[in-house]
Image (cartoon, rainbow, N blue to C red):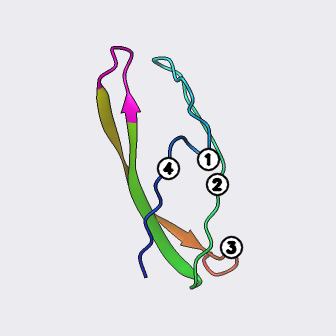
Amino acid sequence: RETEVQGEGVVGVQPLIAPGEEYQYTSGAIIETPLGTMQGHYEMIDENGVPFSIDIPVFRLAVPTLIH
């Protein structure tokens, strides 16, 4: 099953990230199987007001004890 999530901000926050800075956050997902994947993109706006998109490559979601 595929679910799409949309919304403004990253877990409700719209951070201002200066060049060279990093931003980290923690989030979660409820899935119906022991294994799953997630992927997507972030839509951002640069310092000149120009929108751009950053791809999030596919990554695995797994029950911690399932995979070594």
Which badge, 3 or 4, is on the more N-terminal residue? 4
Amino acid type indicated by mark 4: Gly
Residue 2, visible in the rendered structure: yes
* Mark drawn on residue 27: 2
At x 46%, y 64%, the residue is 38
Q: Is residue 45 magenta?
A: yes
- The prevailing secondary structure element of the residues shown in magenta is loop
Cα gap from disc 4 to disc 1, whole angstroms: 9 Å
* Dot placed on the residue nearer the N-terminal end, 1 or 3: 1
Check if mark 2's residue and mark 1's residue have beta carbons within 8 Å.
yes
Residue tagged by mark 1?
A: 11
Position of 32 relative to 39 (above/below): below
Amino acid type, label 3: Pro
What's the residue type where badge 1 is placed? Val
Task: Find the magenta span and give its range.
Answer: 44-50
Category of crowding for the residue at label 1, using alpha-carbon neighbours closer than 10 angstroms: few (below 14), some (14–19), many (at least 20) = few
Asked whether 21 or 27 is in front, the reply is: 27
Q: Please rate how many residues cluster around mark 2, counting C-alpha atoms within 10 Å: few if below 14, some from 14 to 19, many from 20.
A: few
